[in-house]
Amino acid sequence: MVFCQKPVSLQGRRTYSGDVRVFVGVVLPFNIVIIAQAGRLGFEAALFAASLRHFSPGFAGTLYVATPQPGPLWPSTPTLQDPDILALLGEFDAQILPFESRHFGHAYPYGNKIEALAALPEGENFVFFDSDTLITGELGDVPFDFAYPSASARVEGTWPQIELYGPGYSQIWGALYEKFGLSLAPTLDTSQPDEFWQRYMYFNAGWFYGSCPHLFGQRFVEYALAIQNTPPPELICQQLNPWLDQVALPLVIHSMGGGRAPAVQARLDGDISCHYRLLPLLYARESDRVVQALETITAPNRIKKVLKAYDPIKRMIYQGRGAKVRALFDRENLPRKEQAIRNTIKKHGFWVR
C-alpha cells in the first residue's frame, strides 16, 4: 500500500460543474517527468529540456528524464546511453531517473509512463509530459490544482470503436466504471448527445498530473492490468493496444477525485505547451509561434551538433524539409482527421519519423 502526504490546499477560487473544475489561484511547486530511451525518445527528450529551460525559466521543480532499465521484458537494452544526449540533458539540469519495467516493457512501451511514476519522489506534485512535447511558455502561469488530477483533452475519438450490433459507448464505459466500483454518471459531459464519443471522459495521455506519483502510479498499474487481463465482456470487440493507458487514465483520474480541467487545458495544448507527436505533423498543423519556438531552441551550434545525428531532425529542421511540409497545408483549413494529414505528407515524399 502506498501512503502519500495529504496535498496542501491551494489558495484561490474554485467553481464546479459536474466533473469539471475551473480554478484561479496559486500554483504549488511541482516536478516534471518525461520518458527517454535509446533512439528517437532521447532526441525528443533533449528538445523538451531545451524548450523548458528557454521558455519557462521560472520553473523551480526538478526535470526528471525517466529511462527503463534492461530486464526480461525488453529484448534489447532500452536505456538511454548516448553520451552526447546525456551531456546535453545535464546541461539543461535534467536528472536521469532509472526505473524498472515489471509489467509492460517492449510488449507495451506506452506503459513506461505508468511504471516510471513509482521512481519519482513520493508525495511531491508532478506533471507527466510525453517526450514529443515542446514547452512554449511559462509553466508557472498554468493553474494546476494538484489535488484535482486531470489530463489532456486534445484527443480524437480513437477508443472505443463502435461495431454494428455491438455494445455502445455507454455500455462499454459503464462496464469499465462498474468494474472498479466507480460511477459513470458524474463524468458525463451532458452538453454532448448520448452515444457521442465526446460525452464520455476520454483523455490523451500526452500530459497528466497529480499530487503523489506513487499513489497515482499504483492505481494506474492496477487499473491497466485489470483491464488488460480481465476485460469486461462489453470490450469483446475492442483493441486495447495501443490504447490501454488512455482507457485506464480517465478511470484513475475519476477514482482520485479529478476530472476535466478546462482552465489547465486552455494553457497546456494552448500557448504554453505543444504535444506535436512527430515533426512532420508539427510543421503541417501547428502555429507559426510553435515553429518559431522549435527553430529557436535548435539553432545554437552546441545543440545542433547533437540533434543533427537524428535523421528526422536533420531533415525537417536543418535541411528545410519542414518548410516544404508547411507549404502543403492551410492552417485555417486543415483536414479534420490526422490520417489525412499524414497521407498528404507521405504522398509528397516528406514523411520521416
Image (spheres, helix red, strand yellow):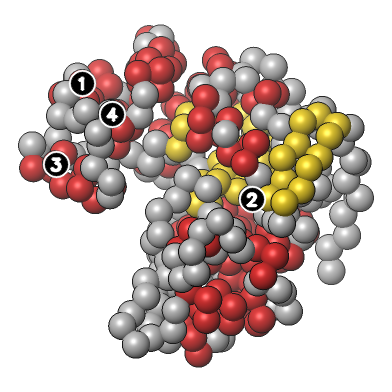
Q: Are marks 1 and 4 in contact (CB under 8 Å)?
A: no
Which residue type does callout 4 highlight? Glu
Task: Report the disc number at residue 323.
Answer: 1
Task: Return the residue at label 4.
Answer: 332
Side of 181 where 251 appears, left or right: left
Which residue type does callout 1 highlight? Ala
- Measured as percent of width and height from the top left, residue 132 is found at 44, 38
Most foreground residue, 291 or 74: 291
User: Which numbered disc, 3 or 4, marks the residue that appears first in the sequence?
Assistant: 4
Q: Residues within 10 Å of mark 4 (few under 14, many from 20)?
A: few
User: Which numbered disc, 2 or 3, marks the residue that appears first in the sequence?
Assistant: 2
Quarter of the figure with residue 146: top right
Q: Nearer the viewer, mark 1 or mark 4?
A: 4
Q: Nearer the viewer, mark 3 or mark 4?
A: 4
Question: Residue at coordinates 45% horizontally, 54% vertically from top-left?
Answer: 77
- Measured as percent of width and height from the top left, residue 301 is found at 37, 10
Quarter of the figure with residue 159: bottom left
Marker count (numbered): 4
